[in-house]
Structures are given as structure tokens and as C-alpha cells.
Image: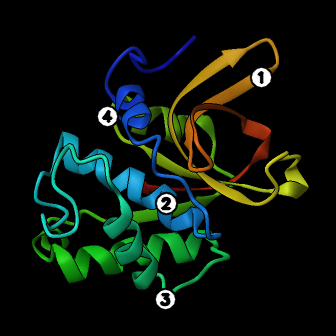
Amino acid sequence: MLINNTEGGLRELAASLNGWKNRDDTCGAYAAAVMLAGLQDSEYPDLIPETIRKPGETDGTKLVAALTACMHGAKRTLPFNVSVGVNRFIKKYAPEYVQLSVKAHFRLLPGKDLLKEEFRKGHFCCLGIVRYRGSRYGNHWVTAYDLAETEKGIVYLAHDNWGHPEAEIPARWVNSVVYMR
């Protein structure tokens, strides 16, 4: 059972951003960039300045660079780094959204209910997946857009910034989530 209409919406956006490939260990910034691009393209067209990314644009180079700078260049990112980096980006580039209380939050060991709620709103969520929970990726960040309940358990459908826009991430791999509210 899928939560979202994965034939369009977030799945389609994730596929259009398939060229956003992490080649320098900045997977947290890439995952956050996809999450923010989703918000820009669906709800907040001026969340990201047009000098960094125009709505619908498929090149995320400037956005990833700006987010990496807001994360103080952190290449090994914890949920706190990703969340605070996104909030620094919003404060610097879109301060009007600070007053609207649009900001990133993080949670460790999230349950499916939080993610279901965000997916139903049409929001991407950044998932931190870790080796010690069985991830074959090792420690990594992906951007989820839906979940499925299968005979093997819950699986998140995600944009993996190593070039897989429809990666299936078992829930047991997930250590944390960064999401927007």
C-alpha cells in the first residue's frame, strides 16, 4: 500500500532531479536540496532566490553549494547539521519564511506516522540511514517521498543522491528524519 499518488507529484519531481548526484560526500546537503526544491516547486516559489534556483529548474549545483556553506562545509552530517543548515539557509535567503515559522525539524528513530503525515502533505523528508541499522549504503542521506507496507515490512521510496530516484529504503535502516513544518 502506497501512501502518496506516486504516479505524479513527488515521484515525478524526484525523477526530474535524478541528475543531482553527490560526488563529494555532501549527501546531507543534497538530500536537503531536494527537500527544499520540492517545497519551492509545490508551495513556496520564492523560498529559494532565483539566483540560486528557479522553480522547476533541474540544476541544483548552486542550491547544494549554498546549503553546504550553511552547514559550514560539513561532509559528515548528523541530523542536527542538516536541520540547522536548512534553517540557516532560510534565515539568510528567505527571512520572510522565518516569520511564517517555516523551518526544518529533526527526529531520531522516527515512526512511520510522522512520515505518512508529511507525505500526505506532499512534502519530501530527508532520511538518515546508517550502517549499524543494516544499511547497505553505509551512513548516508536520501530524500523520501512515499512509503509502502510490504511483506518484508515498511519500505520508503526515496531519491538517492547517488543517482537512484526510486530507491527502496527499508525502515529498519532509518536512524533519523529531517522534515519541514
Marks 2 and 4, how far apart at CA: 21 Å
- Neighbor class of circle 4 (other Cα within 10 Å; few <14, some 14-19, many 20+) is few
- Mark 1 vs mark 3: give the one in front: 3
Of callouts 1 and 3, the N-terminal one: 3
Query: Which residue, given by chain and number where applicable, does mark 3 sit on?
Result: 72
Residue designated by label 2 = 30
Residue flagged by tag 3: what amino acid is it? His
Do the CB atoms of the residues marked 2 and 3 lie less than 8 Å apart? Answer: no
Q: Secondary structure at mark 4?
A: loop
Q: Residue at x 43, y 32 (%)?
A: 15
For marks 2 and 4, give the one nearer the viewer: 2
Residue 59 lies, in percent from the top left, at 32, 53
Label annotation for residue 14: none
Q: Does residue 137 appear left or right of residue 20 in this picture?
A: right
Q: Please, is residue 139 above or below residue 115 in the view?
A: below
2 or 4: tag closer to the N-terminus: 2
Q: Give whichever of discs 4 and 3 has the lower sequence position.
A: 3
Q: Is the residue 174 above or below the residue 2 in the image?
A: below
Residue highlighted by disc 4? 121
Q: Amino acid at mark 2?
A: Tyr
Residue linked to disc 1: 153
Identified by mark 4, the residue type is Lys
**Residue at disc 3, secondary structure:** loop
Residue under the point 40% across and 59% down: 33
SS type, badge 1 = strand
Quarter where residue 117 is shown: top left
Please tell me how crowded label 1 is: few (under 14), some (14-19), or many (20+) other residues with Cα within 10 Å.
few
User: Mark 2 or mark 1, which is nearer the start of the sequence?
Assistant: 2
